[in-house]
Image (cartoon, rainbow, N blue to C red):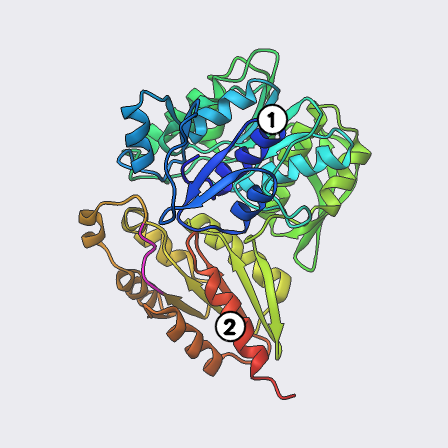
Amino acid sequence: MVGIGGSGMSGLAAVLLRWGASVTGVDAVLSRPVQQLAQRGARVYAENGAHKLPDEVDVVVASAAIRDTHVDLVEARRRSVPTIRYAELLGMLMSRRHGVAIAGTHGKSTTTAWLAYVLRTAGMDPSFVVGAELVQLGVGSGVGDGPHFVVEACEYARSFMNLSPKAAAILNIEEDHLDYYPGIAEIASAFGDFAGLVPADGLLVVNAHDARCRGVAERSAAPVQTFGLDGEPTWSAADVAVHDGCCAFDLLRSGSRLGRVRIGLPGKHNLMNALAVSALATHLGVSFSDVREGLGSYRGVRRRLELRGVADGVRMLDDYAHHPTEIRATLLAARERYQPERMWVVFQPHQHSRTRFLLEDFARSFDLAEHVIVPEIYFVRDSERERELVCAEDLALRVRQRGRDALHIPDFQQIVELLVARVKPGDVVITMGAGDIWKVADELVRRLRADLPA
């Protein structure tokens, strides 16, 4: 497994080990997930270590981030060893169970993990692979003896077309991955093809408020249920109340009240995610009482508005948001939950192409923040030509033009120094992005606590 430390790859490696496979893997960094795999019996190596493709190997699996020129893939082709991508292996494993796939531009990890958690608390012992680590379980994957295999379905490069779901959800459809898709029409078409994977005896759950979701649902042979807050969706919420940023509501199915539910994740977007979970869990045989328990006790996945620490009245949070819609939802949830005096956002753009295509949307997404700091763009998958077309200062400039305080500071340590000097009690600092910006949050926590008087 090339790139075995990735969130999805490490999850699949754990599944394979549980099912009795012999697993060898290589990654650039021997991270904690990689070390955990080694403890479970995998042989793992660092990219720069003493490693070569094993003499006996049935298949080489590469994550989506690995280029075809990687030395292990080249060697595998030379030896005529089959090579596949992560999504292909995921589909192969899913076909052995009752597959449930969660797709959408936003909210996939949270909703996939939430459904897996509800099934587990209901005693149904599912297998699952999520692109993030569940807070309560400390893992991003699990192997159970139950019939269900719950997975996060990614649309990048149409990888979700490798899956074989018996039930699925499409949470939303927006512009993203524009380094692969020419535009929103092609993105919606791909989701339509995904919807067509669900068989006639399965279930497709879609967002009633998203016109593209409703449109692609027409391409599914499966029964369709909708979720939403207005109109007449199959699953909805009534008498919604917000306490400390989290929603309590009456859960409705086809207009009938099932009972009162309170969730522990902040933000209206998580209320929508909870409705999708309710629809799928009920379809899979979970009782309302177990759905209510699982919805209420779930605490999310890592890097989703995660509180990293508090020091001298300053809260430091970290979030994975890397798309304008996600940023807006996260900042609104943070304001409702913590009601900060000032909000500082340290946003690391992910990919030059995404930044360039969605530049104006990104600039608008920070309107709820008083201060925005932009380090260098996290460079992944893009070409050097794409790198030349946009820079982090372009985004900072657009944010300033909208009347917000915004700085481009390339170096993480310089960002920490500025925050240490300027934050005050009552402030909230959020590091945000899909790269390694979480390092700023952790260092800031360390520095602020170190500076407190003994």
Neighbour tally class for label 1: few under 14, some 14-19, many 20 plus, Cα within 10 Å: few
Dominant secondary-structure state across the stretch colored magenta: loop
Quarter of the image for the N terminus: give it.
top left
Q: Residue 401 appears at what percent x and percent y?
A: 30, 66
Quick check: marks 1 and 2 in contact, CB under 8 Å?
no
Quarter of the image for the C terminus: give it.
bottom right
Q: Earlier in the sequence, mark 1 or mark 2?
A: 1
Q: Quadrant of residue 148?
A: top right
The residue segment tinted magenta is: 375-379
Name the residue located 44 percent from the left edge and 74 percent from the top edge: 416
Residue 352 on the magenta span: no
Q: Residue 402 appears at what percent x and percent y?
A: 34, 65
Q: Residue 437 appears at what percent x and percent y?
A: 44, 60
Task: Confirm whether residue 48 shows in the render.
Answer: yes
User: Of residues 337 and 73, which is closer to you in this image?
Assistant: 73
Residue position for label 2? 444
Q: Quadrant of residue 280?
A: top right
Mark pair 1, 2: CA separation:
43 Å
Q: Residue 433 appears at what percent x and percent y?
A: 44, 55
Residue position for label 1? 20
Which amino acid is tagged 2? Answer: Leu
Total marks shown come to 2
Q: Is 186 drawn above or below residue 352 in the view shown?
A: above
User: Of residues 275 and 26, which is closer to you in this image?
Assistant: 26
Residue 377 on the magenta span: yes
